[in-house]
Amino acid sequence: MRNIWTICRRELYSYFVSPIAWVLLTIFGFLSGYFTYFISAIFVRYSLEGQMSGQGGPVNMNEQVIAPLLSNISVVGLFLIPLISMRLFAEEKRQGTIELLATSPVHDLEIVIGKWLSAVLMYGALLLILICDFSFLFIYGQPDWKPVVTGLIGILLQGACLLAFGAFISTLTKNQIVAGAVGFALSLLLFVLSWTTSFGNSDTVQVLNYLSIVSHIESFSRGVIDTKDLVYYLSMIFLGLFLTSRSLESLRWRA
């Protein structure tokens, strides 16, 4: 456990001494603030229009604000997560330190989990900005806190899943741009698989929809933690880390 934390701390430090962390925080902060303001403004406008017309208006802030906001943020994550994971092993290969890492007495799994955990913490730092945005909704409104908490858990699990596969992709190349591009392509593929539901309701369509990473975030945004969604995310995380460990093991043998 000590080795995992040492690797995690070293990797997390490298994010913040480079422009990567600050650029990601700036981009995410801008997009998160924009979506929060835009969706909240629409909610307020339709509420006022409904009250003035005497027909009532949308009064459920969780359905009208929280759920759409979480949905948009989960999509934003598809673009930013590859930027977090692309350097995990590709940078080591570019600098020529991957051989030193592969021949070190540290176990492969400790290296993989340490680097992956640092990426998850970096993504969690981005979500702290979203929590700050949510605080304004609680100050000026009365949303139910349970969908907010479960939604954040779902987004974090989604990010952890994509980061696990991003780490695997990063072991395959020493070019960070290539690792980021392939990671984004995989994220996009797992996103568009949910579109297959428009082609019918066959068994194949249901399987493809289940493999889509965004179809499992919906229940979290409604305040429901479904077992099948937890099993999906945890299984995908395990698969991504397993592939990363096997890829690193092959590098160790070649070194």
Image (spheres, grey):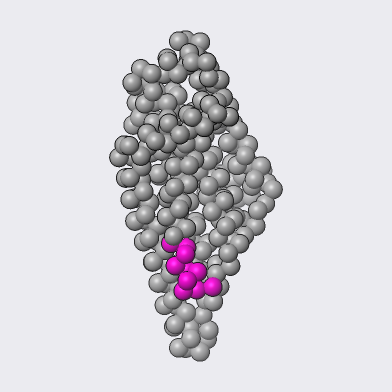
Q: Is residue 217 left or right of residue 12?
A: right
The residue drawn where x is 41% and y is 77% is 45
User: In the figure, 237 relative to 96: above or below?
Assistant: below
For this rendering, which residue is in front, 40 or 120? 120
Q: In the rendered view of the protein, which quadrant contains the C terminus? A: top left
Q: In the rendered view of the protein, which quadrant contains the N terminus? A: top right
Give the residues drawn in magenta, as a range: 133-142
**Percent x, y for residue 211?**
59, 41
Q: Is residue 107 left or right of residue 122?
A: right
Res. 102 in view: yes
Q: Is residue 213 left or right of residue 185?
A: right
User: In the figure, 240 relative to 45: above or below?
Assistant: above
User: In the figure, 126 relative to 87: above or below?
Assistant: below
Specify whether residue 141 is painted magenta. yes
Is most of the magenta stretch helix, strand or loop? helix
For this rendering, which residue is in front, 53 or 21? 21
**Percent x, y for residue 78?**
44, 45
Res. 181 in view: no
Specify whether residue 187 is painted magenta. no
Number of labels in the image equals 0
User: In the figure, 41 relative to 102: above or below?
Assistant: below
